[in-house]
Image (cartoon, rainbow, N blue to C red):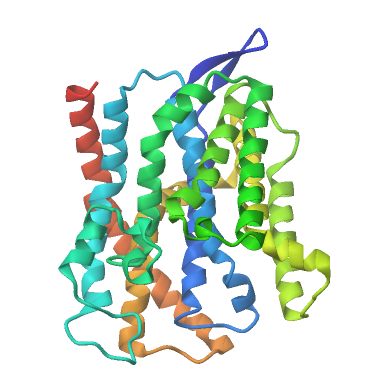
Amino acid sequence: MSTTASAEAGHVVTLVRLDSLTGLRWWAAFGVFVYHMVNFAPVPILNSFALHGHTGVAFFFVLSGFVLTYSSHGRGTTTRNFYWRRFARIYPAHFVALLLAIPVFYSFSSDPAHDWIKPFSVGILLLSVVLVQGWSRDPVILFSGNPAAWTLTAEAFFYFLHPWVNSVLRLLRMRGAAIWVLTAFGGAVGFKLLVLFVPGWWAQLPLPITRLSEFIIGMGVAQLLISGYRVRIAPIVSYLLLAAFLCWLVLARRNDWTDLFTQWVEMMSAEIFVALFALIVLTVGTRDARGAPSFLKTKVMLNLGAWSFSFYLVHATVMYAFIEIFGRQPIAYSNLLWYVPTFAFAMLVAWALYRFIEHPFERRMRRWGNKHLA
């Protein structure tokens, strides 16, 4: 994110690199890893928290909308070069991760004991190759190829919309951006209420449609920062709010709270998580904009953040390969020991994917795009 300037209310706002967001991205990927570890090596108590790790995907979508909007400000990138850069960003790593996943998740002979293995189908796999599997709600198609890659269908859809949506969003100043965020959040809440209380075809809308509000909210938060808004809340406060909400959900489930308030909060938990993620991105972005130091900007966190996309793509493949070899483990505290080799091997594969595929291919493809599509 290069330094640019934005006018708001008669003064100039300097946009600086927000490196902490790279480190922050790692924790979302790790949350998804912990969530999937429940299928392999469940741990008492930890399981109750791990089951919410899937919300890391929502964080990715919010962060994606934010980063694309913030980084595109003040740049004259053509729409076709923007699309090429997005393709360069995700496709090389996706394609190789898909090749790695096929031997783990597919077989020519079925085995009921291995319920994660699907019968080999060229037609279904081709849907994953071209990243359209996420438009289906059928689990056989939605989670085809590399099961983690359904999110890339949503990302591809968001990328397609971004230049057009951003052409409107960039016209908004601070108040308009705030209204944008609140409207998007209100739309998400309204849609959830519609699905819960008015049965209809909308409940089966494809995930790229139902998750679009998360990306749109992230875009609006970026425009808030671009317009000069600086939230007066330290990141630690947003972290504590997230931790408190997570603990509350776990306690409610473990103690079987059934009051009306608890039921409503649990029904709206996905939307509350998105609101908290947006707050985290805004507070961390504000801190970076002010030039304050951050643990998230350390070399270790920046490296983990850089590898997080590859880690996300391969972690389930590694995990289910371990299940194939060692079997699912009964719930026990000793299962924490399984986290070490599983995590270490997934990180090794992720590092190799980033080092030899994701990073060099993206760099070369972007260079080609800058030359031919600018």
Picture residue at 74% right of the left edge, 54% below the top: 241
Number of numbered discs visible in the structure rendering: 0
Q: Is residue 219 left or right of residue 268?
A: left
* For residue 261, side relative to residue 363 (left or right): right
Where, quadrant-wise, is the N terminus in this rendering? Answer: top left
Where's residue 286, x and y in %? 64, 33
Q: Residue at x 61, y 51 (%)?
A: 191
Q: Nearer the viewer, residue 256 or 332?
A: 256
Query: Which residue occupies 24% across, 59% down?
Result: 127
Percent position of residue 246, x then y: 69, 64
Report whether 368 appears left or right of 242: left
- Give the vertical position of 109 relative to 219 (above or below): below
Rendered image quadrant of residue 176:
top right
Residue 215 in the image: x percent, y percent?
Answer: 51, 42
Above or below residue 342? Residue 292 is: above
Residue 298 visible in the picture: no
Image quadrant holding the C terminus, namely top left
Position of residue 31 relative to residue 89, above or below, is below
Q: Nearer the viewer, residue 344 or 281?
A: 281
Is there any visible trace of residue 310 in the rendered image? yes
Q: Nearer the viewer, residue 355 or 325?
A: 325
